[in-house]
Image: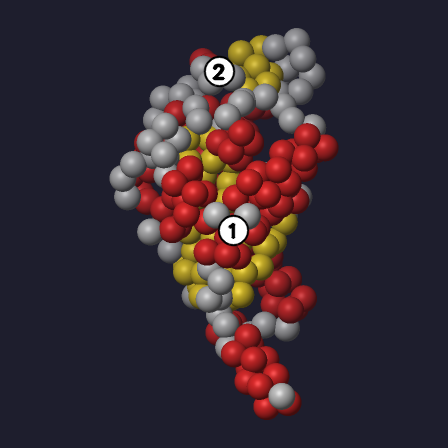
């Protein structure tokens, strides 16, 4: 029995680590169980940034890879991993309509930004236009990046955001609503990874083509406001 326990512990420790970087706790709640099931041959860890890492702490085109590496260093420290333990970083981001023409950012009376499938309403149009330019430049850097500190890296998008893709409605969800919906979503696909892959690969939401082609598509016209994702590619 003691020998069996030693062998089991050794096999677990030999697993390589896949790190998911997500924006909020509801993202992990919705996707955590299916990702851990699919990538069960590896150790799966989620890093919750609590916001948009492309906009947090004055991230820039030049500093974004450093900020992602800082997240990886926190995982190393927390779980006592070595550099060689990691094999993959999967970064999941919202597009937030970042690529739309500036003419489709409209002045709105509401204090908070509102997203629609053909435009954005914002109190400060210029501020959103600047945000879009900044985030667009950072996302371009990320989608052209194949490795972060030697670890394989890919960034996958949900448009306009994760809730839009998973739940089919583009609106402002409260944190409480997000948590309820994500828990229900996780329950729905618990132990049903093939059904989840079928859902996320459906032609009405999955952008077809290669990794780079899907990013080319989402950058065009108003596609970054419409219900699209390329998360299906992580399962190929």
Using the image, determine if residue 65 lies above or below residue 156.
below
Q: Residue at the spot x=48%, y=15% of the render? A: 119
Image quarter of residue 163: top right
Q: Is residue 214 left or right of residue 165?
A: left
Badge 2 crowding class, 10 Å Cα cut-off, few under 14, some 14 to 19, many 20 or more, is some
Name the outermost residue toward the right.
Answer: 176
Name the outermost residue toward the front.
Answer: 1
Mark closer to the chain start, 1 or 2: 2
Check residue 148 in the rendering and tell me which mark sits there, or answer none. none
Say if residue 189 shows up in the picture. yes
Q: Mark 1: which secondary structure?
A: loop
Instruction: Residue under label 2, please give it.
Output: 119
Instruction: Determine the CA span between mark 1 and mark 2.
Output: 38 Å
Q: How far across and down, in percent of the image, does residue 73 sit? A: 60, 64
Using the image, determine if residue 69 lies above or below residue 214.
below
Total label count? 2
Of residues 118 and 36, the one drawn nearer to the viewer in this rendering:
36
Marks 1 and 2: which is nearer the front? Answer: 1
Q: How far across and down, in percent of the image, does residue 141 sit? A: 42, 45
Badge 1 crowding class, 10 Å Cα cut-off, few under 14, some 14 to 19, many 20 or more, is some
Picture quarter with the N terminus: bottom right
Q: How far across and down, in percent of the image, does residue 49 sit? A: 63, 47
Q: Mark 2: which secondary structure?
A: loop
Q: Residue at the spot x=58%, y=86% of the render? A: 4
Image quarter of residue 74: bottom right
Of residues 61 and 198, the one drawn nearer to the viewer in this rendering:
198
Check residue 191 in the rendering and tell me which mark sits there, or answer none. 1
């Amino acid at each position: 029995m003691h020998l069996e326990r030693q062998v089991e512990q050794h096999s677990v420790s030999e697993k390589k680590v896949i790190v998911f970087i997500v924006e909020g706790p509801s993202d992990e709640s919705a996707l955590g169980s299916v990702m851990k099931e699919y990538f069960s041959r590896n150790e799966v860890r989620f890093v919750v940034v609590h916001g948009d890492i492309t906009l947090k702490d004055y991230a820039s085109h030049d500093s974004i890879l450093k900020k992602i590496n800082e997240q990886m260093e926190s995982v190393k420290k927390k779980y006592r991993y070595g550099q060689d333990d990691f094999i993959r970083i999967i970064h999941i981001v919202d597009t937030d309509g970042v690529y739309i023409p500036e003419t489709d950012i409209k002045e709105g009376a509401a204090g908070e930004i509102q997203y629609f499938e053909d435009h954005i309403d914002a109190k400060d149009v210029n501020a959103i236009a600047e945000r879009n330019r900044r985030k667009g430049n950072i996302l371009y850097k990320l989608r052209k990046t194949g490795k972060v500190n030697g670890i394989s890296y890919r960034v996958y998008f949900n448009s306009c955001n994760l809730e839009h893709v998973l739940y089919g409605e583009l609106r402002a969800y409260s944190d409480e609503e997000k948590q309820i919906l994500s828990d229900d979503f996780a329950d729905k696909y618990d132990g049903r990874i093939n059904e989840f892959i079928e859902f996320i690969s459906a032609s009405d939401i999955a952008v077809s083509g290669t990794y780079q082609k899907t990013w080319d598509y989402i950058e065009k016209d108003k596609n970054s406001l419409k219900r699209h994702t390329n998360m299906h590619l992580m399962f190929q």
